[in-house]
Amino acid sequence: MILRNPMPGRRASRAQRKRHEDAADWLLRNREAGQPPAEKAAFAAWLDEAPANRRAYEAAELLMGEARTAIASDPALADFETRPRSTSKPVLGTLLALAMAGTLFVALDGPMRMRADAMAGTGETPVFTLSDGSTVQLNASSAVAYDFTAGSRTVRLLRGQAYFEVARDAARPFTVEAGTARVTALGTAFDVRLGDAETDVTVTHNAVLIAFESEGRATLRVQQGEQAVYERAAGTKEVRLSDGLTALAWRRRQLVVDNAPLSYVVEEMNRHFSGRIVVASGELARRRVSGTLAIADTTAVLAHLEQALQVTTNRIGPLILIR
């Protein structure tokens, strides 16, 4: 797990986080071949805007250095022949090495690490406490950032899923931003999942108010024992009864599904898998699955899917193809 600045008094501000995002973006752009002079000038101007910009860029370069170290420590990558056969193109080897480092920078979650205050790695579900006494548990491969001020407490769910137990503070509302949804606690324990296609909010204690950017000030109240599902593309919302033990099974490293699409199951499996699991077709992705799955046990879940759906799985290095 990567856990940075867990206390809001030491957290990065929104402006600092934006600066880190810009630094990561510039780092990758600066490693592209044939960068136009105008872009180089824009980068120089950005560096000169503030000393903090230069410090953020140096931090991004340190992360890129970690990527290069990872390359050097991997025998297969360290021995990779980057020197071009033709001496007429001496720069090609350097470009290949930079491209490899840039790709690994992304693969090692460099851009997200520049934005997040706390992250969970593959298969991790850490719990941490904020300075106000609220606790947060992250699902695997999830990330959050937070901004606490004298008048508000805001957590941004950047990726994945998190469960919140909110400490009472009438003077400072506690809000979780997940995509275009804003979830405000009403003395509450609740779960927010930012999926590929939908945002789910499950309330286990008291209630929350959910506001959506596209609907102005209109809010949706979700009570204890209910779950709100927001389909982002269609803009549709549904509130339904929810069994907290089932909805929060991920906290026990389980996934409980009842007639759920295979695409949902695979999305959850990928949180716990260091490679990538892919479904071969959209039709197959819509096939339905039921059962209680030990979601961190990829081999066992794949065996269940093979039996339940009569599918086959093929491993190609870090990739698993379901067809």
Image (spheres, rainbow, N blue to C red):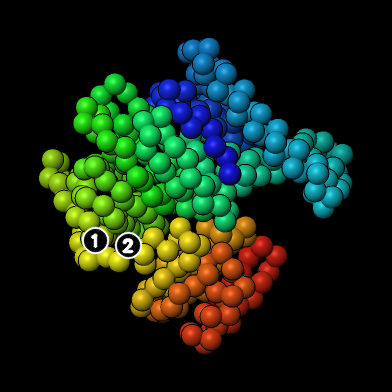
Against 274, residue 218 (above or below) is: above
Q: Which mark is residue 225?
A: 1
Q: Residues within 10 Å of mark 2 (few under 14, many from 20)?
A: some
For the point 62% across and 36% down, which residue is it? 32
Q: Nearer the viewer, residue 239 or 113?
A: 239
Residue beneath the point at 52% across and 67% down: 295
Question: Looking at the image, which is closer to me, 164 or 159?
Answer: 164
Give the CA distance from mark 2 to mark 1: 7 Å
- Say which of 205 and 240 sits in front: 205
Residue 238 image point, x, y percent: 20, 62
Tag shown at residue 244: 2
Q: Is residue 227 left or right of residue 117?
A: left
In the picture provided, is 195 more to the left or to the right than 37? left
Counting from the top left corner in percent of width and height, residue 242 is at 27, 65
- Nearest the viewer among 187 and 54 is 187
Dots 2, 1 in contact, CB < 8 A: yes
Q: Is residue 92 visible?
A: no
Asked which quadrant contains residue 214, the reply is top left
Q: Classify mark 1: residues with Cα within 10 Å, few (<14), some (14-19) or many (20+).
A: some
Q: Quadrant of the N terminus?
A: top right
Quarter in which the C terminus is drawn: bottom right
Amino acid identity at mark 2: Gly
- Rendered image quadrant of residue 187: top left
Tell which circle, 2 or 1, labels the residue nearer the N-terminal end.
Answer: 1
- Type of amino acid at the residue the image marks with label 1: Gly
Q: In the visual, does 298 lie left or right of 244?
A: right
Placement of 86 over or under 257, stated as above or below: above
